[in-house]
Amino acid sequence: MSDAKPRTPLLARVPAWARSERALLWLTLAAATVFFLWLQGVPDDPKESLEEIIAEWNAGEWADTKDYARWGTYLFAWVNVATCGLLALTLPIWQRRTESKAINAKPLIGGKWFWLGMGVAVLLGGGLRWSTATGGLWHDELLNAQRINGYYKFDKKDPLFGDVTFREAKWVDTAFYYRKPTNHVAFSVPSRITHSAWQKLTGADRSALNPFYLRLPSYLAALGSILLLGLILRRWNLASAGVIAALLLAIHPWAIRWSVDARSYGLTMFFLLCAVYAVTRIAENNRWRWWALFGFSQAYLMWLSVLNVFLAAPLALVLTWIIFRRAKQQNEPLIDGLGRLVFVNLLAACAFLQVMGPNLIQFQQYNDFRPPSEAEYLQVDADNLKDTATNWLIGLPHKLPVEVGDAPITTFLSRYSEDSAIVGTTLAAGILLFTLAGLVMLAMKSSSPARLSAIAIFVGGVSLLLISWIQNLYFYPRFLAYMVIPLAIGCAVCWTGITRPLAKLSPKMKTLAPLLGGIVGLIYFTALALPQIDNLARNEHEPLPRISAAVKNYAASNKVTPLAAGYGLGSDILADLIDPDIRFIENRKELETMMAKSRETQRPLLVTYGVQSFNRKVLPDGFVLLDDSKYFTRLERFVSNDPRHTFFLYEYTGKP
């Protein structure tokens, strides 16, 4: 036998005091403090950047993005150093050396059938989102892409025929350009990573734009949200409802439409569910790993949008209630639980301020230049409320403008005319009643206090709507896309709960009864939402890449390089990001200039336009020529999943 002594584990060599919870928390604060101290020294001349910001602000202009990044990084690094110092000083006051016991010790239900159902939900969700994820980017997404990949710059003296250069996006623009809230920086950063990886791996040109790899973070987050939703309800001992809720989230048109958008909406759903999962696990065992997940999720939610405070705050209140409940039931020190909550949220605030601080300065300047009450954006009104309600409840837009030639889609008003409006309203109200009933049923169950998280999300969304209305803030229905989560949870709980009494008939019905009710409910919702599910599964957002391809095919077929132009909104971003050979024109004079150039050079002229509901009102003069068959002949129509994004390609055939 060997006389060698067994090795002492490395962790066991560390003194007990150094392995204590308090020591680890102090170590965390020390590491954060050192990092923030280092970070404040990174920016060059931050005070000079502040002076530049103030000077430009007073002049009604914008400073360079680098100035906001430098001053914001410096300022909030010092704020965070002070915050960490305060946390270190107060740590001994609240931290207690206690061992939390699990409140929910029940074994998880749901075996192979649960994982089979979740697999179907994820695959179904991925398939239904594929066309949306891989199709053309619409103009708001492309505005975001300017800060992710870059854009084409045209000769200011001769924008129609002059030289073109590509301006690569800088990392400082990706993370800190916020002159308009169209750059969703918390999406832009991971999107740039995935898109740049695609360019490097495939050898694509730096100016090349791939919609799928640009949207990849949102697509993965959408699939992760479906999976997380099922796992959360399983931990609430509602495995059947978890499968049904995941399937409902997978097929809900509002989730399909916005969860893979190249902006923040899909990531908001994912990190919202991460926070709910963390709350659920904290209610079970109170481990620091789940507190860390909760803090990270809260910070990322706020980085995605400051409006997500309407989600972060209610979830923190739910966690506060859980802390009081644990103190009463487990006889744990109340100050320890509340201390953890403050500790984690302040560290999350530090992370948020550090990455978002420079952008908050710009956001304040933006609101100073254009107060929300004077902005030309949508606000809460009757039409907006109706559109929000029908999109949320049955997945159909309430009403969409359709001009002559646009490819219409099914809307609430087109499906339920004035004579049958009461039918559509009743069917939609059914989904609302199922949602509210399910949330009430959820609140009445006592196995997991984290179940109140679903109600917190619902209350947060309603609060955002009310505050936007009271304060006259700009508001788009898509701001509430995450409301499909409480809807899916509420409907699933209600549907599976209605048929639960049938479980008494036989042992097999114990599992089958809830699923039967859930399947019937899914069929009911699918019947209401099917036109939009089908539309989104088949059509893309905005067919700009297909327009570029059609122009190139025309050139190849006719063996001539045509002049090409795009008229009005939508065509501007086509030229800036997708095809600089299709020059942007915005009035009749520029259109006539292109027509004259075509006659002079004997080159064909192709003109595209879309978004008729906007362009025909704002830029009517050019349509006098474009609509005249003596001058232009239509070559092709490009259909979108939104009639407003129907585009047309015309060929110039006559003289003015």
Image: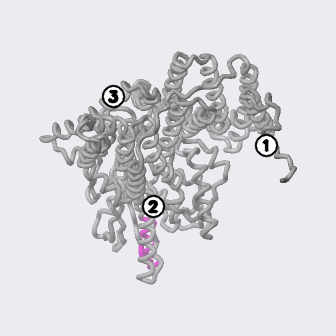
Relative placement, left or right, of 13 versus 632 is right
Q: Nearer the viewer, residue 215 or 272?
A: 272
The answer to whether residue 479 is above or below residue 125 is above
Relative to 467, is 340 on the left or the right?
Answer: right
SS class, disc 2:
helix
Q: Which residue is mark 2?
A: 134
Q: Examine the residues drawn in magenta and state their main secondary structure.
A: helix
Which picture quadrant has residue 624? bottom left
- Which mark is in front, 1 or 3? 1
Q: Which residue is mark 3?
A: 441
Which residue type carries mark 2?
A: Thr
- The magenta stretch is 592-605
Q: Secondary structure at mark 3?
A: helix
Q: Can you tell which quarter of the image residue 282 is in?
A: top right
Q: Residue at x 57, y 16 (%)?
A: 331
Whether residue 13 appears in this view of the structure is yes
The answer for how far apart the CA atoms under marks 2 and 1 are is 51 Å
List x then y, in percent, for residue 549: 44, 71
SS assignment at label 1:
loop
Instruction: Choose mark 2 or mark 3, whichever is in front.
Output: 3
Mark 1 or mark 3, which has the lower sequence index? 1
CA gap, disc 1 to disc 3? 50 Å
Q: Which residue corresponds to mark 1?
A: 9
Disc with the residue nearer the chain's start (2 vs 3): 2
Q: Residues within 10 Å of mark 1 (few under 14, many from 20)?
A: few
What's the residue at 38%, 50% (across, down)? 113
Q: Is residue 587 visible?
A: no
